[in-house]
Image (cartoon, grey):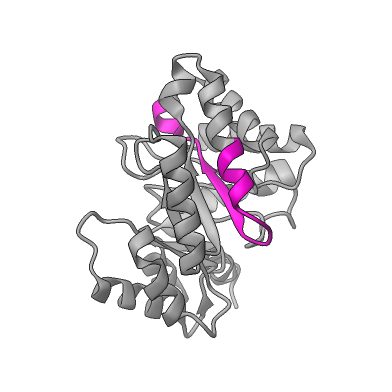
């Protein structure tokens, strides 16, 4: 296998195949789950709205593919109690991974107590081996100091992954944000993963982020346990490369 195809194969194994479209239907979720496992291997996870967790889990019951869902999404300004319920309901429905939107607007206001309260509350109701992935919404934070601070707070609260974006704002993942987040992970000394998400559509897009991870964290660091791509169209590009 050529080096380019080997890289495409590696990327495939790191994808959280996502459908968070507002009008998503059960039929689209069935298609998503079927596509997550193909002739070249399977994605790491599917990421769906909470209402589709049970369906996704039933479709993937004998599969190593994880089921991820989103809470406090996409605005990040929900109440703690409501987000706890949303999270517990998703876990009870079979979710393996919870992608929580950090209250980024509160952080922009300097209100770290609101951020910490949300992170701590949700961490407390997401038991191992379930994963907590915290979405920083870096395209809205913009300021490198705020992105680093958001990453630091998420890691300090016990996040298993930090994630760039919801994909619902004008700016999603950027190399600058990912570089900052990788540096914060490295400085923490904790085993925390990274998930670039939003706007990653081509193999070259994905390779840019994968090369950043390799450069900062080492060649063997990025695996499905430590690195994911949140994407809806990336699988198409990867399959074209492999074909």
Q: Nearer the viewer, residue 58 or 37?
A: 58
Q: Nearer the viewer, residue 72 or 228?
A: 72
Q: Is residue 24 above or below residue 149?
A: below
Number of numbered discs? 0
**Picture coordinates of residue 97, whole percent (x, y):** 54, 59
Q: Is residue 141 above or below residue 3?
A: above
Which corner quadrant holds the N terminus?
bottom right
Asked whether residue 173 appears in the rendered view, the answer is no
**Picture coordinates of residue 147, whole percent (x, y):** 54, 27
**Picture coordinates of residue 217, whole percent (x, y):** 73, 45
Q: Going 69% across and 46% down the picture, which residue do you hit? A: 192
Q: Nearer the viewer, residue 44 or 215?
A: 44
The residue furthest right is 189
Q: Going 75% across and 34% down the picture, which residue do you hit? A: 188
Q: Going 32% across and 56% down the picture, which residue do you hit? A: 20
**Picture coordinates of residue 226, whole percent (x, y):** 66, 54
Q: Quadrant of residue 6?
A: bottom right
> Range of the magenta residues?
120-140
The residue furthest left is 23
Q: Nearer the viewer, residue 139 or 26?
A: 26
Asked whether residue 208 appears in the rendered view, the answer is yes
Q: Going 54% across and 71% down the picture, which residue do you hit? A: 5
Determine if the magenta segment contains residue 137: yes
Determine if the magenta segment contains residue 147: no
Which corner quadrant holds the C terminus?
bottom left
């Amino acid at each position: 296998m050529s080096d380019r195809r080997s890289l495409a194969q590696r990327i495939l194994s790191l994808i959280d195949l996502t459908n968070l479209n507002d009008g998503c239907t059960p039929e689209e979720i069935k298609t998503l789950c079927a596509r997550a496992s193909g002739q070249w291997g399977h994605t790491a996870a599917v990421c769906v709205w909470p209402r589709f967790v049970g369906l996704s889990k039933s479709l993937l019951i004998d599969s190593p593919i994880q089921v991820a869902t989103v809470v406090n999404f996409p605005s990040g300004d929900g109440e703690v109690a409501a987000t706890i319920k949303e999270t517990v309901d998703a876990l009870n429905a079979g979710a393996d991974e919870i992608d929580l939107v950090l209250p980024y607007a509160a952080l922009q206001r300097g209100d770290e107590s609101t951020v910490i309260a949300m992170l701590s509350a949700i961490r407390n109701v997401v038991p191992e081996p379930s994963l907590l992935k915290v979405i920083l919404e870096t395209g809205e934070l913009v300021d490198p100091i705020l992105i680093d601070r958001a990453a630091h707070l998420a890691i300090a609260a016990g996040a298993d992954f930090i994630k760039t974006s919801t994909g619902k704002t004008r700016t999603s993942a950027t190399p600058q944000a990912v570089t900052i987040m990788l540096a914060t992970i490295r400085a923490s000394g904790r085993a925390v993963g990274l998930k670039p998400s939003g706007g990653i559509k081509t193999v070259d897009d994905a390779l840019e982020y994968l090369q950043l991870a390799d450069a900062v964290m080492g060649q063997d660091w990025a695996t499905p346990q430590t690195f994911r791509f949140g994407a809806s169209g990336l699988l198409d590009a990867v399959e074209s490369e492999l074909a």
